[in-house]
Amino acid sequence: MRMDSERKVTAADEPLIEFRGVDKFFDKPEEGRYQVVGDLNIKVRENEFLVLFGPGQCGKSTILNLIAGFEMPSSGHVLCMGKDITGPGPDRGMVFQNTALFPWLTVMGNVEYGPKVRGIKKEERRQRAQHYINLVGLQGFENSFPVKLSGGMQQRVGIARAYCNEPLVMLLDEPFGHLDAQTRYLMQDELTRIWQAEKRTVIFVTNNIEEAVYLADRILVLRNCPTGVKAEYEINLPRPRNYTDPEFLRLRREIDSVVDHTL
Ligand SMILES: Nc1ncnc2c1ncn2[C@@H]1O[C@H](COP(=O)(O)OP(=O)(O)OP(=O)(O)O)[C@@H](O)[C@H]1O
């Protein structure tokens, strides 16, 4: 079982995930062929916390879906450790806004689901699932069903479930978008704590600028459809971060000034 706090699977300058000249078109009934991603080039470093920030409908989820292997590029390459991504796999874990938990399974059942379908023996997968349930702070709720849990607790289950597959990269698609403001702040702190305790490569999508600056090692500001990288910011503020810190506010203003606010 691999539960080391910081793994390294790539060579020093090798990106874990790379987009090389990626275009993505969809066919829409009324608009016909429609370009969502245009000549996208991104390199994601192993164990970094990368935030994709951009206006609504700019193509953020499409980028995650290309990494997850739910969508294929129309042209160009999406690579994981130098190899083309050809479909979904347990090396890429997804956490959704609507949690997408299995309502008929308990917390333990949800978290151990991935290792179970991959045939990992009960004792080992239980031990692994318990580790991640503890990591996200849900010990004592192993036998609860999702419907009995608050929104924030359901997101903790989603994070533990993704971690339990021990993926190379965690893809989080506006995971806190449905939470009330207070729970959202709490979950931002919790995600930072979890990520610091067990470093993973995280690609986190949000359209909330404060959330982006609060969480990220690096922010890619995306432009409107067809999307591409408009600007890039390394966020070197120490953690835990403070929303009212002058440098935080300066970065927030600066990033806001480059965002496409119109569709
Ligand atoms: N499978 C699909 N078929 C056709 N069009 C699609 C498909 N997936 C996404 N789109 C379109 O691509 C565009 C970008 O959608 P996407 O969900 O990637 O944006 P987003 O930035 O994640 O949006 P939001 O911030 O609202 O979640 C939208 O116009 C959407 O309707």
Image (cartoon, grey):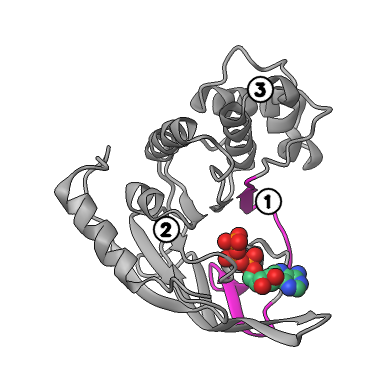
Residue 85 seen in render: no
- Amino acid at circle 3: Leu
10 within the magenta span? no
Label 1: element kind = loop
Q: Residues within 10 Å of mark 1 (few under 14, many from 20)?
A: some
- Amino acid at circle 2: Leu
Give the CA distance from mark 3 to mark 2: 29 Å
Q: Residue at x 36, y 70 (%)?
A: 13
Number of numbered labels in the structure image: 3
**Disc number lying in front (1 or 2):** 2
**Disc number lying in front (3 or 2):** 3
Q: Position of residue 127 (x, y in %)?
A: 63, 23
- Using the image, determine if residue 153 lies above or below residue 194: above
Residue 149 tag number: 3
Q: Residues within 10 Å of mark 2 (few under 14, many from 20)?
A: many
Label 3: element kind = loop
Query: Does label 3 or label 2 sit earlier along the sequence?
Result: 2
Q: Position of residue 110 (x, y in %)?
A: 73, 31
Farthest top residue? 140
Mark 2 residue's CB less than 8 Å from ligand 1:
no
Residue segment shown in magenta: 73-97
Ligand 1 falls in quadrant: bottom right
Q: Which residue is mark 1?
A: 90
Q: Residue at x 49, y 79 (%)?
A: 228
User: Is 220 left or right of 131, judged from the image as shown?
Assistant: left
Q: Which residue is mark 2?
A: 50
